[in-house]
Amino acid sequence: MKKQRVRLKDIAERLNISVATVSRALRNRIEISEELRGKVKALAKEMYYQPNFMASHLRTQKNFSIGVIIPRIIHQYMASIISGILEEANDHHYQVMISVSEHLYEKEVKAIEMFSSGIVDGLLICVSNQTKYISHLEQLSQNNIPFVLFDKDISRIDAPKVVVDDYTGALGAVEHLIEQGYKHIAHLQDNLINHSSQKRLKGYYSALKKHNLQKNPDLVIELASISIEESRKAVEELLRTYPFVDAIFGITDEIAIGAIQAALKLGRKIPEDFGVVGFSNWQISSVVSPSLTTVYQPGTEMGRTATKLLIQRIENPEKFADNFPTKILKTKLLVRESSYRKK
Amino acid sequence: MKKQRVRLKDIAERLNISVATVSRALRNRIEISEELRGKVKALAKEMYYQPNFMASHLRTQKNFSIGVIIPRIIHQYMASIISGILEEANDHHYQVMISVSEHLYEKEVKAIEMFSSGIVDGLLICVSNQTKYISHLEQLSQNNIPFVLFDKDISRIDAPKVVVDDYTGALGAVEHLIEQGYKHIAHLQDNLINHSSQKRLKGYYSALKKHNLQKNPDLVIELASISIEESRKAVEELLRTYPFVDAIFGITDEIAIGAIQAALKLGRKIPEDFGVVGFSNWQISSVVSPSLTTVYQPGTEMGRTATKLLIQRIENPEKFADNFPTKILKTKLLVRESSYRKK
DNA sequence: TTTTATAATGCAAACGATTACGTAAACGAT
DNA sequence: ATCGTTTACGTAATCGTTTGCATTATAAAA
């Protein structure tokens, strides 16, 4: 009743030849005469033969699949990274398995263990916000499982990395505000565990210093969580306490949008007497009114680059035995209405 | 040099027992004495043993992984579906492999072929816009590979399906506009190949009919592609040609936002003299100004439901041999500024 | 003591593909 | 006729687990 899958053996029996011959014929080995190769292929097609990857992978110790571990997926930037990963993987005939850690360290460790069981040839990892220990990553190195870190940097671990130039991106964003004439620029960010956050903060400080603006620790606000509402509340409070603040650099677009809403609510004119810049270039940012100036992060490119690096490492282990490149992708400032006062 | 992976054999040799015993001990079979089981497990842990899934899957013909085929991923609604899939799969200890068809029929077929090679136990499929033929899906049935269709419905194919109630959703959205006093409601949609689009169009017509409003084919616009710009252009033209139009039901939030922009540009007041409703509840919709009334689609729930159905079908093939359920998820109208005129 | 039941373990054959090695036939060169 | 090559294929081991069917030891029953 239940139709069995067609195996090499079935083809072999129909043609009265050996399984080995069928295998070789299908993979175009020259040792098999052209005539027979043709016959085998024709019959395979006719019988809808599909190779059993489980078996061939067990034998060859190769999977043609890579695992991806990310903190969350409902997030435009992350979705664009995944998109890049899928594209690049597809180009190289690799399949992609995704696991979401939900920013929980434990889930991250579990995912890595799960992927360490031979179902993938390598791993693409974006560590969670909670990840402070790295023994699970070192375990991977010891088990000889190639992996590449992306987006979030963990400086202590020795592995290929692909990150965005947060420092320069933030620096440019804040310099732009300064050039537009804003004098008292606040910075809203999430907790500082995150490496990117730290870099963006540094960029912010550098820009102030470069232009001889005083840095005021009260103008750096650390939000408990990243959301429009949270940011709106914080900015309202900030503007009541320090009314002289005339611009905000938000660490994400969500935060920047919250800032816009708060400023509008308090009667500020954007960009005339209040400027806002965000980070990431979510689709929202071009649609809100006023449209949001933001730092574009090349998500798709990051996905592609990380995947390319991983596949190279998988297919050429010796070559990458000791020198692990860190690719730093350039951001791009997209100037829109929220910060551009024509002079 | 290169450290070998630890196998059952390695553990067996260290303990001077057979491989079979180790295998059974690790899987908690009662035939093995508790004492020995303990010893084996301890040593396995000590040696960092990770079972080789390739081998065990080959033997058991079971993968604990499912394949997902979607048209694209950078799309909030789709990302939320994926998120639901990943959650549910994770709960049942399944892994998820994703393939993107980019709305190309050929890529969809290729993906299905690829997944038919035993690397997944079942498939979750959201067909592309271009998919008119279904032989590739029938092939799956014949090859005994369980699959579930989600989001996009193809009525001709016999399989479990999970869809959203587009008809009722659209009906409710348009009725809401009517109740708010809008009289000349236009509808903007994409090409009609899509089943959902057709259902939403029907809902639109039904609402008009129910409230004795005349249907005017000129007020149903078919866009070449879905984007804010495309929609803005179309709506501008529409409003110039038919100035009496006072509301728009857009088939997605993008289209609705384009409509808002066009209406504002032409000096219409929203919601006073112009109403707009979208479909999907993207994050954007609550942030634009005026905020957008829209029909919420339960993406995460759809992902979870489809996955649950698939896993049931995988683990209980007989039970689902002939009766394939179609789950229709309820939408929910979220009334916001773009359509709510207080009376 | 012999028989029988029970518990605990080993043996070896799968799963389906790949591949090192072996072999038979055909051919040309000596 | 003999030998060496080449061509074209077959044999069988292998990848790491799982599992049906022994097998052995131990205990209980006769």
Image: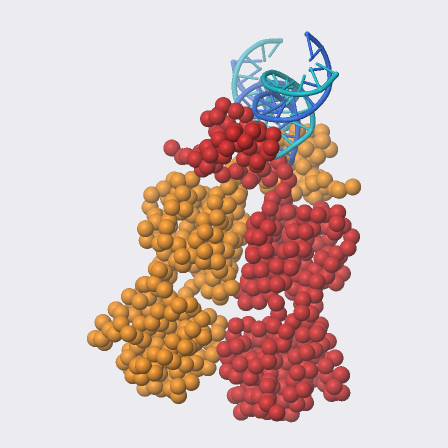
Chain colours: A red, B orange, C cyan, D blue
Q: In which quarter of the image is the N terminus of chain A?
A: top left
Residue at the spot 39% in from the left edge and 68% down from the top edge: B224
Towards the viewer: B223 or B6: B223
User: Could you say where residue B172 lies in the image, as x and y percent from the top left?
Assistant: 32, 71
Residue A311 at least partly seen: yes
Residue at the spot 66% in from the left edge and 35% down from the top edge: B8
User: Could you say where residue B77 lies in the image, as x and y percent from the top left?
Assistant: 46, 64
Residue at the spot 56% in from the left edge and 64% down from the top edge: A80
Residue at the spot 70% in from the left edge and 68% down from the top edge: A195
Residue A107 at least partly seen: no
Q: Is residue B325 above or below residue A240?
A: above
Towards the viewer: B39 or B300: B300
User: Could you say where residue B233 lies in the image, as x and y percent from the top left?
Assistant: 41, 77
Q: Is residue A16 above or below residue B277?
A: above
Q: In which quarter of the image is residue A182?
A: bottom right
Q: Is residue B300 above or below residue B42?
A: below
For the view shown, which residue lies furthest in the left direction?
B212
Q: Quadrant of residue A172?
A: bottom right
Q: In which quarter of the image is the C terminus of chain A?
A: bottom right
User: Could you say where residue B94 lies in the image, as x and y percent from the top left?
Assistant: 53, 49
